[in-house]
Image: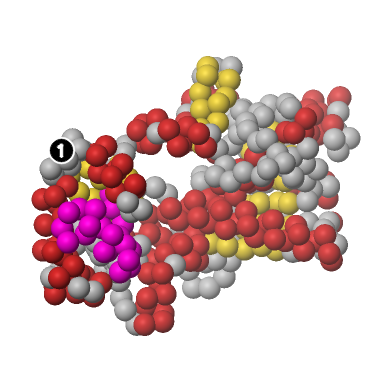
């Protein structure tokens, strides 16, 4: 570890990670990458399924979500396991969980219980539908939330029915907003000395992420519909075939529209009443797109990307994921973090999408195997020797 990595911004913050699946681990990954000491709390390993667990642990998704953490196994359903967790929580700064809302109460590890032991604790809960309300106890999965928020109703080609986004967008955004909430609460603790309960949900997070589409309804009463690759309100935008591929354009506003017409060699569009205003272009988008498509088909991707960008217009390739990571700008930004993995060899993981000028950030530890740090973590609360062996024999850890 470099000196810069050793003094990352969250160095000294202890996080207990009770999360599973994606939303919670996404939140914790932000904290872990920026230096927090994250202790992942897991159930003791069932020997009959240990090989299956090992295979999952070496998969791309797990490695990407759980790097920079330590792991301890604790049976939270046992009195001893719960007592050990409460001892760990008494020394922690943050606890993150994404159980259904009633589970933490059944286990006796809810916010009020932990706050009694540690008033400075930031306790973060990420759920499908919120901590209370008519749907609070429902299982909340990304695809279900995409449907319920209207996300699927605005995604895809018009007339082809609702389509889910190609990523777990509700999970990911809930994780990011959860991390923002935790960091906000940590900042306030610096002024008050007190912790608090941070709550977010997939339902709230995806509605917030839909942003201007939701605002169209809330402010103007408009119900957005599918627009495919076109922008719902800005024309022309979208994907067009070239001689050797496809390009993406976005022409926003009157100035850009005029610039686009000149760059495409179609000044006559400026005098065409069908295309005179954005409203007219929107009403006649099919006719306009057909005319634009005919021009794009005359040259290559490279020609149009270079020509339009040189004209001050937004134009880019339509890549697959490999092409995206091969792109010169993506390589320059360094968002693919290199990792030397003992079992997987030299691999890359998806890095943090922001940088800080004073810090070098990367993967300090690969995703842990269950309980690999049991001894070290329990030693930090005075558990060693015969007591450790007893906990193992009784399947508490």
Looking at the image, which residue sits at the far right?
382
Left or right of 235 on screen, residue 312: right
Placement of the C terminus among the 4 image quadrants:
top right
Establish if 283 lies above or below 102.
Answer: below
Q: Position of residue 108 (x, y in %)?
A: 71, 56
Looking at the image, which residue sits at the far bottom?
220
Residue range (magenta)? 248-267
Q: Position of residue 120 (x, y in %)?
A: 82, 58
Q: Quadrant of residue 275?
A: bottom left
Residue plotted at (41% across, 69% down): 212
User: Residue 154, can we see it?
Assistant: no
Q: Is residue 187 magenta?
A: no
User: Residue 96, can we see it?
Assistant: yes
Placement of the N terminus among the 4 image quadrants:
top right
Establish if 269 lies above or below 389.
Answer: below
Residue plotted at (50% across, 62% down): 205
Q: Which residue is mark 1?
A: 243
Main structural element of the magenta stretch: helix, strand or loop?
helix
Q: How many marks?
A: 1
Residue density around tag 1, few if under 14, some if 14–19, many if 20 or more, within 10 Å:
few
Residue plotted at (24% across, 53% down): 263
Residue plotted at (80% across, 43% down): 12
Q: Position of residue 89 (x, y in %)?
A: 78, 49
Q: Quadrant of residue 265?
A: bottom left
Left or right of 195 on screen, residue 324: left
Q: Secondary structure at mark 1?
A: loop
Nearest the viewer among 246 and 192 is 246
């Amino acid at each position: 570890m470099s000196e810069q990595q050793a003094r990352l911004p969250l160095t000294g913050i202890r996080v207990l990670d009770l999360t599973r699946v994606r939303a919670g681990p996404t939140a914790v990954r932000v904290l872990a990458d920026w230096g927090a000491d994250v202790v992942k709390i897991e159930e003791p390993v069932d020997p009959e399924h240990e090989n299956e667990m090992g295979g999952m642990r070496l998969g791309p998704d797990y490695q990407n979500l759980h790097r920079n953490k330590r792991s301890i196994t604790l049976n939270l359903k046992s009195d001893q396991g719960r007592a050990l967790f409460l001892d760990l929580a008494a020394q922690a700064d943050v606890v993150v969980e994404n159980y259904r809302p009633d589970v933490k109460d059944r286990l006796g590890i809810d916010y009020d219980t932990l706050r009694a032991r540690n008033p400075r604790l930031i306790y973060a809960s990420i759920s499908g539908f919120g901590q209370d309300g008519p749907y609070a106890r429902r299982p909340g999965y990304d695809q279900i939330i995409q449907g319920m928020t209207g996300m699927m109703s605005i995604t895809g080609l018009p007339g082809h029915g609702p389509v889910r986004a190609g990523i777990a967008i509700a999970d990911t955004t809930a994780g990011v907003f959860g991390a923002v909430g935790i960091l906000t609460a940590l900042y306030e603790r610096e002024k008050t000395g007190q912790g608090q309960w941070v709550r977010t949900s997939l339902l709230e997070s995806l509605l917030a992420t839909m942003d201007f589409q939701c605002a169209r309804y809330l402010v103007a009463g408009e119900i957005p519909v599918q627009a495919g690759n076109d922008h719902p309100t800005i024309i022309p935008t979208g994907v067009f075939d070239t001689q050797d591929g496809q390009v993406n354009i976005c022409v926003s506003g009157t100035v850009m529209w005029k610039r686009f017409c000149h760059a495409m060699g179609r000044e006559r569009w400026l005098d065409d009443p069908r295309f005179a205003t954005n409203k007219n272009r929107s009403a006649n988008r099919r006719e306009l797109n057909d005319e634009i498509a005919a021009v794009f088909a005359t040259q290559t991707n490279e020609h149009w990307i270079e020509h339009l960008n040189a004209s001050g217009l937004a134009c880019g390739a339509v890549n697959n994921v490999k092409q995206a990571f091969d792109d010169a700008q993506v390589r320059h930004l360094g968002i693919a973090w290199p990792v030397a993995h003992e079992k997987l060899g030299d691999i890359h993981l998806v890095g943090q999408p922001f940088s800080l000028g004073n810090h070098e950030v990367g993967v300090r530890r690969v995703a842990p195997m269950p309980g690999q740090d049991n001894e070290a973590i329990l030693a930090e609360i005075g558990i060693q020797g015969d007591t450790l062996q007893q906990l193992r024999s009784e399947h508490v850890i």
